[in-house]
Image (tube, coloured by chain):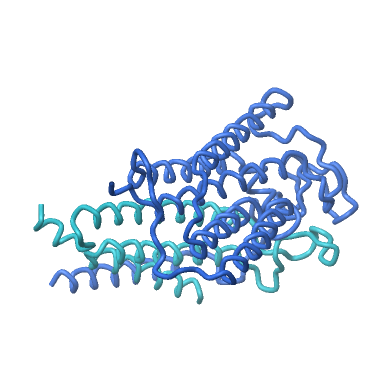
Amino acid sequence: MIQYAAILLFVLGLYGLLTNRNVIKIIVSLNVLEIGLNIFIISIGYVSGGIAPILTSVNNTSALLFVDPLPQALVLTAIVIGVGTTALGLAFAKSIYAKYGTFDLDEVEELK
Amino acid sequence: MKKLFAFVLTIGLGVLMIFSLRANTLFPEFGDVSIADRISALFLDKSVNGDNGDVVFGQTTDAEDGAANLVTSIVVDYRSFDTLGEVTVLFISSLGVALLLGVAGKQKRLALNFKPNFMLRVGSRALFGIILMTGVYVILHGHLTPGGGFPGGAMIASSILLLYLADDEFRTKVKGFKVLESVAGSLYVIVGLLGLVLATYFLQNFLPTGTVGDLFSAGVLPIVYVLIGLKVGSEISGIIDHFLTEGDLA
């Protein structure tokens, strides 16, 4: 059931991307969309009663019931790339503000 | 009107996704997953190149991949090529930030709205050391405990950010970060090429993997994760520096 909640988050971010014209709000929507996707990928790998896929002195053998480590590794990649794109987007926002004095893309088009 | 159109479109997309997933028998119910049917079972048993039986913490030696943290064994060993691409993406984005925000000539940092007093300055220095040490610990134990190069690098960058926010005269040496970043990135590729020369494939583990659970185990994994940690830490610190400085007005 939580998988559908993740889809809800994804759709919410998509709605924000389609309706907002403020650069900062677009970046926030992109991040919400991304979090929804990450939760969805993680939830695919969940096993009922499974433990975190790390061998320790307590959970010491790979014969135990672990959750799927592969989606977690993929999401680790996705999070880092999300940080990179967010930083680049904020840099764009900063240079737009320095040039036009506003974050609103409609106002930017009028000023052009 | 435009908002209504976007609303209908997104609701339609969400409903389409949910119903198509419900109708699909291949899509598992939440938690109702059998690891044995998936390729991850091979990653968990470290048996991708042949059945090696169960891995036991502290006893199994010379396993196919010696990391106790099974996510790390995927990120930096089985799918290390993905991670190289990911590090490249982060490098390109930090390069883009430097291109957009960097200005030639003398730069000055953004002024704080308040004058930091003695307590704030000394306290932030003490906290800086603790956060930095935690970051280094997380990076070094990436193959044993949760964490690794990416979160550890972010912790190092957050300690730099703390100094920026608590001290009005603090400036990092951006050139030093650039050098560290390029050296770490090149060494990652060189480790991969060494795998090609000394073993068979690019980025293959060419060192003995040791006992699962020891600090000095897992072959090249800790080395690669330390390099990733240094690279991520210096890249994010460089991004922070670019956001908090501006060109000299004079």
* Residue B143, image x, y percentages: 73, 51
Q: Is residue B93 left or right of residue B78?
A: left
Q: Residue at x 39, y 58 (%)?
A: B110
* Residue A58, image x, y percentages: 84, 67
Chain coloured cyan in the rendered structure: A
Position of the N terminus of chain B, as image quadrant, is bottom left
Q: Is residue B123 left or right of residue B23?
A: right
Task: Give whichever of B122, A98 is nearer the camera.
Answer: B122
Task: Give whichever of B177, B154 is nearer the camera.
Answer: B177
The answer to whether one can see residue B41 in this image is no
* Residue B13, image x, y percentages: 31, 66
| Residue B62 position by quadrant | top right
Q: Is residue B18 left or right of residue B39?
A: left
Task: Give whichever of A51, B216 is nearer the camera.
Answer: B216
For chain B, give the colour: blue
Disc tally is: 0
Task: Give whichever of A56, B5 is nearer the camera.
Answer: A56
| Residue B61 position by quadrant | top right
Pick out the residue farthest to the top: B197
* Residue B69, image x, y percentages: 73, 55
The answer to whether one can see residue B75 in this image is yes
